[in-house]
């Protein structure tokens, strides 16, 4: 079987994203070699999605230190961070949420995945990516030997840009993303991943502070908080656009290549 056939076999492009009859890790050496050399892109200097000086004053994190909110959050440990997120009232999304969605997985993972925001199911269950898109994401992760389930593969930590569901699954508004940004940045600092994979336009544009489309962000290595970042399509988009599954596979292979270059195994 040639490389392309093996890749399509691994992708299950015509059906679903599973490895049939092969251990996930068996494909990696071949597929990583297929990823062309890529440019490493420094911090993106294009126009920000939101202006940070427009951020309103907030009342959630304890203010007794006198430090600005983002600085206080940057000093939180996991317990303080979880507590701050679950009690957050910094934007209007708190009014309609059922649960905050903090993130899930191995808090010492070498891989971190970042999505956009909780949807209806995630809001109900308090866990990211639990619907159909989540199933595809889990299959994608399995295909490269990763899993959010302890003991089922190399660990990942999965989080979103927003911790609360936007009504009707609309895009996050700039103030909402700005209020959640210190939480995500603190999660990145606490996990200390070797690689971040960003899922979809909204997550990528907010995290990288750019308005460049995913099609132009993918295939390059970006950087956030000193961690290399690879952008790929959102699994919900891939459910609708099967033809881009092969590109998403290339993105995961690129992420594996960067991970290995940074000492990951
Ligand atoms: N889409 C996301 O980006 N995140 C989720 O948690 C669920 C769907």
Image (cartoon, helix red, strand yellow):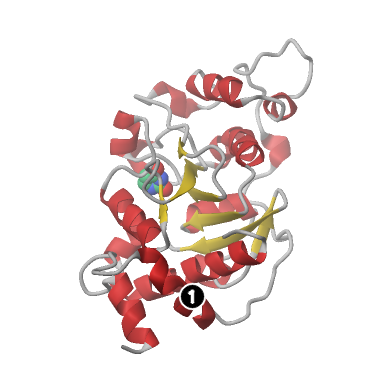
Viewer-side residue, 193 vs 197:
193
x%, y% of residue 100? 43, 27
Under circle 1, the secondary element is helix
Give the image quadrant in which the ligand numbered 1 is located: top left
Instruction: Classify 122 as above or below 228.
Output: above
x%, y% of residue 260? 60, 65
x%, y% of residue 203? 51, 51
Q: Residues within 10 Å of mark 1 (few under 14, many from 20)?
A: few
Q: Quadrant of the N terminus?
A: bottom left
Task: Check disc 1 and report the residue beneath it.
Answer: 29
Viewer-side residue, 232 vs 52:
232
Q: Is residue 213 visible?
A: no
Which residue lies most toward the bottom here?
A: 2
Instruction: Classify 213 as above or below 148.
Output: below
Residue found 35% across the figure and 44% down from its top:
129
Viewer-side residue, 95 vs 140:
140
Residue found 71% across the figure and 48% down from its top:
225
Q: Quadrant of the C terminus?
A: bottom right
x%, y% of residue 178? 61, 38
For ligand 1, tell me if the residue under mark 1 lies within 8 Å. no
Q: How many marks?
A: 1
Q: Is residue 46 visible?
A: yes
Is 222 situated left or right of 136 in this image? right
Quarter of the image for residue 28 reads bottom left
Which residue lies most toward the right here?
A: 66
Instruction: Classify 191 as above or below 83.
Output: below
Which residue lies most toward the left here?
A: 15
Residue found 57% across the figure and 54% down from its top:
196
Residue found 35% across the figure and 89% down from its top:
2
């Amino acid at each position: 079987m040639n490389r392309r056939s093996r890749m399509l076999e691994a992708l299950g492009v015509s059906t679903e994203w599973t490895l049939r009859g092969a251990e996930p890790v068996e494909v990696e050496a071949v597929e990583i070699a297929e990823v062309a050399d890529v440019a490493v892109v420094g911090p993106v200097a294009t126009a920000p999605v939101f202006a940070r000086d427009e951020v309103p004053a907030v009342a959630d994190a304890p203010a007794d230190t006198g430090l600005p909110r983002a600085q206080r959050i940057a000093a939180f440990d996991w317990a303080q961070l979880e507590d701050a997120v679950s009690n957050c009232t910094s934007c209007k999304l708190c009014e309609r949420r059922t649960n905050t969605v903090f993130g899930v997985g191995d808090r010492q993972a070498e891989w971190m995945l970042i999505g956009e925001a909780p949807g209806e199911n995630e809001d109900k269950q308090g866990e990211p990516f639990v619907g159909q898109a989540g199933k595809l994401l889990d299959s994608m992760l399995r295909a490269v030997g990763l899993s959010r389930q302890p003991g089922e593969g190399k660990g990942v930590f999965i989080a979103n840009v927003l911790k609360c569901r936007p009504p009707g699954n609309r895009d996050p508004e700039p103030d909402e993303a700005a209020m959640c940004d210190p939480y995500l940045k603190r999660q990145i600092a606490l996990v200390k991943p070797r690689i971040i994979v960003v899922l979809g336009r909204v997550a990528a544009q907010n995290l990288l502070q750019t308005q460049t489309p995913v099609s132009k962000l993918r295939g390059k290595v970006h950087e956030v908080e000193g961690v290399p970042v690879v952008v790929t399509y959102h699994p919900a988009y891939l459910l609708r656009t099967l033809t881009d599954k092969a590109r998403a596979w290339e993105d995961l292979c690129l992420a594996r290549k960067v991970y290995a270059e940074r000492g990951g195994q």
